[in-house]
């Protein structure tokens, strides 16, 4: 299989509106996020700031700037985020069992535009998927993302 840069995520030409512009990602915390969990999220954001050219700017929940999309961390059900920048406040769920460093950095990666390798639209060029080995109930985790979703 051909070589691919490991840092590849969403292509800015194919998906220009799904990237965070100006290298600054504003974020805020929902009222359900306790201070200890906020600190873990800040540590995960620092990891991404240290590994990339991005900066993260904390804002107050009700500080409004309608021209900017912000990550809004909340304590929802489970661990989840849309892939790439969304319009308006983009909810990132850091649920009850999701407050570990690795899980938070994983969800932030989705918000920054990273897909799971096995779901990428070009995955067949880089990954071999043996459908017989997928645990029942997890088949949707191996569906390829269509390149027109953005």
Image (tube, grey):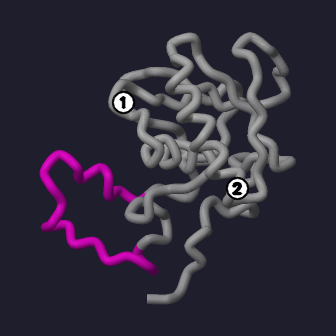
Q: Which residues are magenta?
A: 124-144
Q: Is residue 113 above or below residue 63?
A: below
- Left or right relative to 133: residue 60: right
Q: Is residue 25 above or below residue 121?
A: above
Q: How many numbered circles does the render carry?
A: 2
Q: Secondary structure at mark 1?
A: loop
- Left or right relative to 75: residue 18: right
Residue 16 circle label:
none
Q: Is residue 11 above or below residue 31?
A: below
Residue 50 circle label:
2
State yes or no: residue 24 in magenta: no
Q: Secondary structure at mark 2?
A: helix
Residue found 45% across the figure and 80% down from its top: 125
Q: What residue is shown with label 1?
A: 78
Residue found 60% across the figure and 62% down from its top: 9
Name the foreground residue: 29 vs 88. Answer: 29
């Amino acid at each position: 299989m051909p070589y691919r840069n490991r840092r590849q995520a969403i292509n800015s030409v194919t998906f220009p509106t799904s990237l965070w512009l100006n290298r600054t990602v504003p974020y805020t915390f929902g009222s359900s996020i306790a201070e200890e969990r906020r600190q873990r999220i800040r540590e995960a954001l620092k990891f991404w700031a240290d590994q990339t050219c991005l900066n993260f700017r904390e804002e107050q929940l009700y500080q409004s700037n309608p021209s900017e999309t912000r990550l809004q961390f909340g304590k929802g059900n489970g661990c989840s985020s849309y892939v790439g920048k969304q319009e308006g406040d983009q909810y990132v769920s850091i649920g009850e069992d999701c407050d570990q460093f690795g899980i938070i950095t994983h969800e932030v990666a989705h918000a920054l535009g990273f897909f799971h390798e096995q779901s990428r639209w070009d995955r067949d060029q880089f990954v071999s998927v043996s459908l017989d080995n997928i645990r029942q109930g997890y088949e949707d985790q191996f569906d390829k993302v269509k390149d027109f979703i953005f």
